[in-house]
């Protein structure tokens, strides 16, 4: 489990195929002296991966077909920058929100403009996940915990302060490019609780929420 507060930027130093899987080697000098054991989890731009080797400031990870199918990792090459966060501890300050490191989908950056000293970024998401995104709710973009400003159908906007813009990969995302999205865990589990005993084709609507006392 993570909080979405990025600790450092890493640089991919090697990508290799092994059967249908992929192996990543990422250089993270800031983690060189951290106590990171084999088997520990690290969020790599929002994807929870397991450390299988650690040499100096380089960390190796195996990426399964499942992860490749639901992320952009298959497109990454040496030199690509990634956001990195170690798994949270019981004593960790909870600065963001609960992040599992399980990507729900991809979002396209459709607009980006300055907003005073910050940046306003607008993303479009697939219809399958737009229902989980709420105004002033939490969302994870490439592993970064952010607050949703507005929602308009399948598009939502966020405001990125200068610090976040400088210390994460968001500054390098261009209009038309895609990012990893993880929706809020509460929304995901709430839907499951409400629909577990309903037919597979049932959906959550305004009337459904009213019927169950949520509106």
Image (spheres, rainbow, N blue to C red):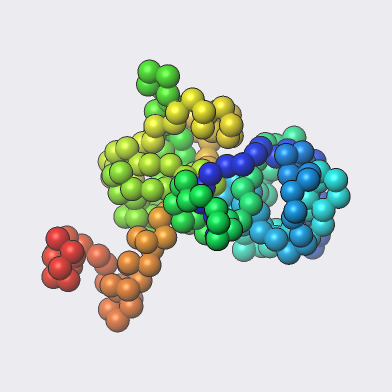
Can you say which quadrant of the picture contains the N terminus?
A: bottom right
> What is the x, y in percent for residue 5?
53, 44
Taking the view exactly as shown, the residue that stands out farthest to the right is 55
What is the quadrant of residue 121 in the picture? top left
Residue at x-position 75% and y-position 53%: 35
Residue 137, compared with residue 195, is above or below; it is above
Left or right, residue 19 beside residue 74? right
**Residue lying at the far bottom of the rendered structure:** 197
Q: In the visual, does 181 lie left or right of 19?
A: left
The residue positioned farthest toward the front in the image shown: 91
Instruction: Name the residue nearer the viewer: 26 or 199.
Output: 26
The answer to whether 123 appears left or right of 206 in the picture is right
Instruction: Give coordinates of residue 18: x percent, y percent.
Output: 81, 59
User: Where does the image place residue 49, in percent across and percent down from the top left?
Assistant: 66, 57
Estimate the x, y position of residue 155 in percent, counting from the top left.
34, 41
Instruction: Tell me the residue at 26%/67% (across/down).
Output: 203
As drawn, 156 above or below 121: below
Q: Residue at x 57, y 42 (%)?
A: 6
Residue at 32%, 73% in the rendered image:
193
State whether residue 99 is above or below residue 209: above
Q: Nearer the viewer, residue 112 or 140?
A: 140
Q: Is residue 66 visible?
A: yes
Q: Is residue 145 left or right of residue 188?
A: right
């Amino acid at each position: 489990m993570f909080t979405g507060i990025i600790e450092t930027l890493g640089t991919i130093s090697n990508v290799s195929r092994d059967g249908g899987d992929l192996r990543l080697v990422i250089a993270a000098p800031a983690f060189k002296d951290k106590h990171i054991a084999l088997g520990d989890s690290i969020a790599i731009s929002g994807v929870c991966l397991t450390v299988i080797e650690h040499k100096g400031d380089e960390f190796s990870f195996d990426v399964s077909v499942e992860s490749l199918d639901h992320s952009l990792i298959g497109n990454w090459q040496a030199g690509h920058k990634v956001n990195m966060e170690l798994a949270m501890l019981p004593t960790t300050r909870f600065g963001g929100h609960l992040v599992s490191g399980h990507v729900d989908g991809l979002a396209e950056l459709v607009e980006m403009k300055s907003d005073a000293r910050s940046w306003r970024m607008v993303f479009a998401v697939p219809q399958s996940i737009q229902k989980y995104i709420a105004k002033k709710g939490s969302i994870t973009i490439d592993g970064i915990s952010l607050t949703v400003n507005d929602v308009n159908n399948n598009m939502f906007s966020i405001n990125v302060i200068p610090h976040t813009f400088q210390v994460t990969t968001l500054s390098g995302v261009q209009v038309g490019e895609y990012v990893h999205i993880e929706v809020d865990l509460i929304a995901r589990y709430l839907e499951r609780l409400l629909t577990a005993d309903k037919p597979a084709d049932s959906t959550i609507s305004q009337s459904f929420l009213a019927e169950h006392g949520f509106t």
